[in-house]
Image: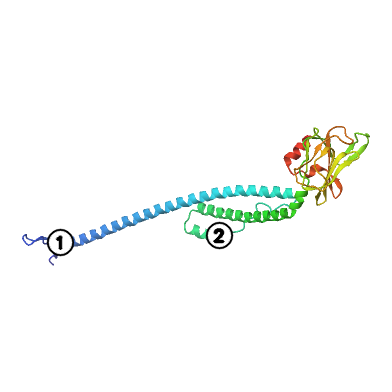
Amino acid sequence: MAPRFLTILFLTDATTSPRQVRLSQRALGGVLVGGVLTLLVLGYIGIHFLTVEVDYLELIRLRHAVQAQQEMAQQLETLSQEMTRLRTFDTQIRRLAGMQAGPAAGAPTLAVGGGTLELAKALKEGEQAEQVLLLARLYQDLERLEREIALRAESLQAVTEYLMKQKDRLTATPALWPTEGHVTSPFGPRTSPFTGQPQQHTGVDIAAPPGTPIRAPADGIVTFAGTLPGYGHALVLTHGFGFKTFYGHNQRNQVSKGQTVKRGQVIALVGNTGYSTGAHLHYEVLLNDQPHNPLKYIVDEGQRANVIRGQ
């Protein structure tokens, strides 16, 4: 059988003879196969290029995710440090207010809703295990901090309400040391400087130069201003909530009976009146008419330390 040919004519214009190309059936098949192979190669190259581009975009996305996780971890660390300071403040203010301890730190971490299923799904889909686990831990830490913030806010709200109720009592508490000087005779048992016999000292003696200001340790009302046997010029302040304070051996009283005084106000001057071996203030704190050690009511730790060192 004679071979078949395919003739292709190329016409350029009417003045020139047409050109023709004769292709045998075998040659035509080769051209078609070559064209198909060319298309397949180009398709493979295109798909490979798209895959590389997708991988590149995925790499960028992962880098952004890692950066976001690192920033989140830093923010959580800062928040955790702030929470530690808040926890310490909560403990200190409760101690000063005489309240019970607040909620314990480090409450158990509760499971994140749906967290396990989402983690398994992510791992199954080929996500980086370390990144997924890190993200899960970050979210758990965040939830833990959110719960503790809620606990601390509730605790401080309770402290605020308590202190508001105790505001008047705190104002009436003799928390200020009345004068500058050093303690020559503390509260408690001692030998009388006049009789040489044992006695219970119901206050503290604070030696100071004559004329040193004596200040009210708390808000109150002057309920006595005059002279008393043995104590010379003396004062009594009534502060409320059962608190009274007594001041003896004053050089001069600066307030009168019935007068209202504020904490820190000058009420008298240190003197040497009455039975006294030198200029000093005899200072007493009474609660429900029972004498108490004045040191126990000083709130300022620095002032308390200075007084103790001066004893």
Identify which amino acid the numbered label 1 is placed on. Leu
- In this rendering, position of residue 41 left or right of residue 303: left
Q: Nearer the viewer, mark 2 or mark 1?
A: 2
Identify which amino acid the numbered label 2 is placed on. Gly
- In this rendering, position of residue 175 left or right of residue 9: right
- In this rendering, position of residue 110 left or right of residue 202: left
Q: Which residue is mark 1?
A: 23
Identity of the residue furthest to the left in this view: 15
Q: Which sits earlier in the primary sequence, circle 2 or circle 1?
A: 1
Inspect this view and state whether residue 99 appears: no
Number of numbered discs on residues: 2
* Crowding at mark 1 (Cα within 10 Å: few <14, some 14-19, many 20+): some
Which quadrant, please, contains the C terminus?
top right
* Crowding at mark 2 (Cα within 10 Å: few <14, some 14-19, many 20+): few
Instruction: Please tell me which residue lies in front, 183 or 28.
Output: 183
Label 2–label 1 contact, CB within 8 A: no
Q: Which residue is mark 2?
A: 115
Q: Position of residue 138 (x, y in %)?
A: 55, 53
